[in-house]
Amino acid sequence: MISKIPKPIIEIIQKLEAAGFEAYVVGGCVRDLMMDVEPKDWDVTTNAKPEEVMKIFPDSFYENQFGTVGIKSEVGVVEVTTYRIESKYSDKRRPDKVEFAKTLKEDLSRRDFTINALALRITNKSPALSSASSADSPEPGSYKIIDLYGGQKDLKNKIIRAVGNPNERFDEDALRMMRAVRFAVTLGGDVKIKRTDGPRKLSKKMPFEIEEETKKAIVKNAKNLKFIALERIQDELNKIMISDFAAEGIELLRELKLLQYIIPELEKGYGVGQNRHHIYTIYEHSILALKNCPSSKLEVRLATLFHDIAKPETKRGEGAFSTFYNHDHVGARVVEKILKRLKYSTDVIKKVRLLVDNHMFYYNVEEVGASSVRRLVRKVGLENIDDLIDVRVGDRLGSGVPKAVPYKLRHFKYMVDKISSDPLSVKMLKIDGNDLMKGLKLKAGPMLGAILDVLLSEVIENPEENKKEILLKRAKELCKIDLSNLREMAKEKIEEKKEEDDEEIKAKYYVK
Ligand code: ATP
Ligand code: MG
């Protein structure tokens, strides 16, 4: 195991020890090492004060007010943190001041979970420093695990347990409650997601279980999540969302009463029944759609979880014949609000919104022609089609009622492929501004642009008209129409089609 600790880390520790200080590898990286998982980052803890650490490592810098020094190394920046205790918390989110501690024990006692409170001491005093050049002789090395809180046993039994009194731990930093859920679903490394055609149910067993007293303390302290910076919350949510147990993670957040402080909108669908086309409630369906989402992209996962977010508020009627008209478009607005609140970037918001807005796209092999596929591609962008299909696959598999057969979506992909070489932008017209200027004796300007737009809107309908002579002839007619009318025409054509789509969707999918 020790051979997995990169040489620069061993050197840092040995240099600190050579200077008369204590130094340990600590926290998540020790946990990962013991689980045979590649640590993401390396943390070292020491009784040397930050100034003392910086004296030993000239190539280091003070990182933050928490007594952490960053040391640049071949394996990235290694964080060396002076033993500390976090004594006073008045706002439940960060210590008012950092106090350095004298002993490793004190430092370990302020860590969140037993499995994260392990330290590793390198007991091999010899090589690294003296024989740094003889890289061919890997150090046999020995190490000792310092385990004051039963972390190894919990690791073996796959248990997440707060260090010491869980109520105090969560009262000090409420984010730890979300970290507990995150670790429960993510520990043990990434599990590859398999694409399947059969629906997946929620797993009964999580990679790790949260210990009972720790769970109780989470429920009790859940409301304190209100005090936590939304960026930190988003960060934990993302880690849950991209894991293979994302659905179980969201459900665990709900069970532990945390979800209402993160995404209350999602809880509104809890226990709300749907119509004869669904066997699950809105909430259950959202979770199962996520479970069955074949994509591991954050945006696609978010869109899948939120695709029906506006169903509770758009529900009309009760029982088998209730309807949810417009829940897709209303949902797009709701999801934007949620993601803005959670401080997501505009890029993420735009993408998730687009996917939610369009998740109801209608497709039936015999009924939907190339032109409607073309319009959809134009609306959502070719680069988003696969993601939109993935949202739909999750939606379908998570409905519990076999509806759209996979064949239909495969056929849809085929159509997208087929039409993606068809004209979708003015550039793809077999005529350009220069041809028009010459043929119609027009000057460059808005009139030219408007004519091209109308031509495009017509070619979308009838690709066979994308021929130079036909387009020029049509342009001559359009030329007689004034600018504002032309603009209306281009717009109207698109709007008209959008309405038609909506009608189709409502007729066939009134159920949704
Ligand atoms: P990851 O796999 O995300 O890196 P990690 O356990 O290494 O998980 P880090 O955020 O890198 O988590 O923190 C390193 C260590 O610092 C943790 O293992 C834990 O000992 C301690 N720690 C981090 N955040 C907290 C917190 N909010 N409260 C208490 N201890 C914490
Ligand atoms: Mg870490």
Image: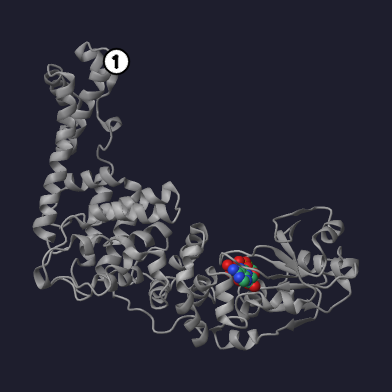
Relative to residue 157, is residue 480 drawn left or right?
left
Tag 1 secondary structure: loop
Residue 146, above or below 512: below
The quadrant where residue 277 appears: bottom left
357 relative to 236 in the view: left or right: left
- Quarter the C terminus occupies: bottom left
| Residue at image point 18% right, 31% down | 490
| Above or below, 444 relative to 156 | above
Choose between 450 and 219: the one closer to the eye. Answer: 219
Q: Position of residue 495 (x, y in %)?
A: 16, 39
Q: How far across and down, in percent of the image, does residue 489 sit?
A: 14, 29
In front of the other: 56 or 10: 56
Mark 1 Cα shell of 10 Å, populated few (<14), some (14-19), many (≥20): few
- Residue 28 visible: no
| Residue at 21% from the left image edge and 48% from the top image edge | 373
Give the amino acid type for the residue marked by disc 1 in the picture.
Ala
Q: Position of residue 181 (x, y in %)?
A: 48, 74
Determine the residue located farthest toward the front in the rendered image. Answer: 90
Depth check: give the residue in front, 408 or 332. 332
Q: Badge 1 is on which residue?
A: 444
- Looking at the image, residue 416 sits to the left or right of residue 12; the answer is left
Q: Is residue 81 visible?
A: yes
Measured along the vertical axis of the image, is residue 323 above or below residue 329? below
In the rendered image, which quarter contains the N terminus? bottom right
| Res. 310 image quadrant | bottom left
- Please tell me which residue is depicted at 65% across the width and 69% down the height of the picture: 88
The number of numbered badges drawn on the structure is: 1
Q: Quadrant of ligand 1?
A: bottom right
Q: Nearer the viewer, residue 307 or 500?
A: 307
